[in-house]
Each structure stands twice: as structure tokens, then as C-alpha cells.
Image: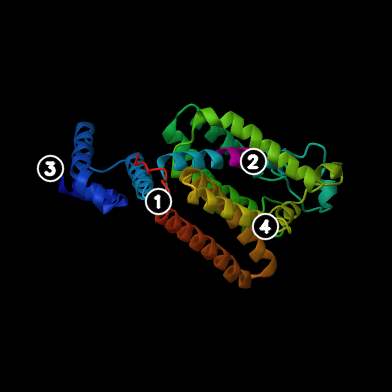
Amino acid sequence: MNSALEAKYRRALRWYPRSWRLKYGDAMLGTLLEIADDDGRTTPTREELADLAVSGLQIRLSAHLSAKARELAATVALVTGLAFSVTYFLFHAWSPWASATEALNDPSYVGFGAFVNPGVLETALWLVACCCACSRLRRLFRASMMTIAALPIVLLLVERATHPNWFGPSTVTLVFFSALALMTFLGTPRPQMVPFGFAVALTGWMIEYVRIGALDRVDAHSLVSEQLLWQITVLSAEAAPIFSVALLTSAMLSLTGRRTAAQVILVSMVPWMVAYTVESVSISGPGLIGSVVLDVLTGGILLVVTAHVARLFGVRHDRAQVS
């Protein structure tokens, strides 16, 4: 037996909870070593390590999020990211109705090939990820999502290298995409729900663009401002009440025993809260972080208290499943 290989697998299995390792760890280790021996390998593959990390984290999360909630949250993240990437492509990365040179009025402007900016890469990756999810190509789907999650780092480095001649995507857009991509690792999206979910999400984004008046300014001299989009979407007077209503709805659903729905709503708020925080800090400075943290803690305390009240009155919750 290769002791070095065994040690590497044991380290990889630390992603799993200790209770799980005590019950299943030896059997899993034996299977991994047997497969490696059959393949003639002396080290774990990258795919194995990635699968162990994701599966281990999912099992750790299963103590707090049911398997159904994780699958639904991952599906929401996928359709939201795909719909926004398509909308972003139409209004920001492509804008076939507008001349970027005229709209930006900047002689130093350099586009991304036939497009206004590299945001088209995000759209392409989300489309690939969606096809992989619907085709149940799990590893390719995860690889696509890892690429989407890492892409903001690359593009932000490019932004710094080319500043001030950078025309998007904005930091908040990139972070929002990254947060959605990471959210898909909570579970496996449900392929049968993707087409309908995408249609609903795309309709929602189009309605939002109508609301902010973007469609009224479609002409050769106008590109839709990303700053305008995020300021109206997540910093408007309606945003805070919407977050509050979502928290209260999640708490009430939890109180009435609908734990899965409560968890999906709560988890789905995270990318929006991240976008809210990034945009707020970019405008108001780091001093606003304390207020955001306080809001999140208040929401967390509210949900914990609600869960305890539900148990006190004997409300039956959905049982968490371990996948």
C-alpha cells in the first residue's frame, strides 16, 4: 500500500464532517485507493480532489440546508446568472443599436473585438454551463462554474492594467456573477426546471430594464450605464424593504414548517446582498460595511429565533437530507 497516496486521500477527506468520516471514511478511502491502484496512479487526480471537496462541503451544509433546498437554490442561481448574462450581453456587451465610440465620446476607447467589452465571455460561459447542466454533464458544469467564479479576478486585473481605458464589466457586475456561480455548488441544478426558470428570470430582468428607463434610451449615442442599473436595482428606496420582506417571508415560512422554501429564499438573497454591499461601499465608502453586517446579523438572529419558536410550538419542519 502506498502510504503517501493514502495520506493525500485522508487529507482530501477532511472536507467531510468528522462524524461522516468515522462512519464512512475507511470504506471511501479503500475505494479511492483501489481505483488509484487499478489506474497505476500514485497521486489523486484533480477531478477526484475537486469532487471530494464539493461533496464534503455539501454534506457539511446538509446539516443546515436540506438536499432539496440546495438543489433549488443552485437552480435559482443558474437561471438568474444565465438570464442576467444574456441581458448584459444585449444591453452592455453588444448593444447593436449603439455606437460605442459615439456614446463614450472617448478617442482612446478600444472594444473587445466586435463587442463593447469582455462581458460577452460571461455570457458564453453561462450558456456553456447551462447546456452542461441540462445534459447532466456534472464535471463540465462544475468546471464552467469554477471558470465563471474565477473570471472576475482575471478581468479586474486587466482593468487595473488598462485603467482608465476600461469600459466594463463593472466590479459589482463581476462580483454578482461570481457569487451566483459559487452558489451553484450548493447542489445539482434540476434540468427540468431550467427552461421555465430562465424564461421567468429573463422576463424579470427585461422588466427591470424597462423600469429603469434603459429601453427608452436605445439610440446610437447611448449605452446603458451599469452604474445606473445597480444604483436603481439594489440601492433604490425599494431595495431595503424588499430585503426586509424577503427575510420576514423566510422567517414566516420557517415558522409554519415550510423550511425548504424558507431556505431557498434566504440563500437566494446572498448574491443580491453581495451586490448591494459592493455597490454601497463603492459609493459611500467602507464605513457602510458595519451597517450591512448589522443587517445580516439581525436577519440571522431573526431566523434562529423563529426556528426555536417553531420547535417550541411543535411545528414540524422538512427533514434535511444528506446526499
Camera sees residue 304: yes
Measured from the top left, where is residue 236 in percent x and y? 73, 57
> Element under label 3?
loop
Query: Dot 3 corresponds to which residue?
Result: 1
Closest to the observer, 23 or 279: 23
Q: Looking at numbered disc 4 in the image, what kind of residue is underneath it? A: Pro
Q: CA distance from mark 4 to mark 1?
A: 30 Å
98 is within the stretch colored magenta: no
- Disc on the earlier residue, 2 or 1: 2
Q: Looking at numbered disc 1 in the image, what kind of residue is underneath it? A: Gly
Q: Which quadrant would the C terminus be assigned to in this image?
A: top left
- Disc on the earlier residue, 2 or 3: 3
Q: CA distance from mark 3 to mark 4?
A: 60 Å
Q: Nearer the viewer, mark 2 or mark 3?
A: 2
Q: Nearer the viewer, mark 3 or mark 4?
A: 4
Query: Dot 4 corresponds to which residue?
Result: 241
Query: Dot 2 corresponds to which residue?
Result: 85
In the rendered structure, find residue 12 and report the number of the disc placed on it: none
Q: CA distance from mark 2 to mark 1?
A: 44 Å
- Disc on the earlier residue, 4 or 2: 2
Q: Looking at numbered disc 3 in the image, what kind of residue is underneath it? A: Met
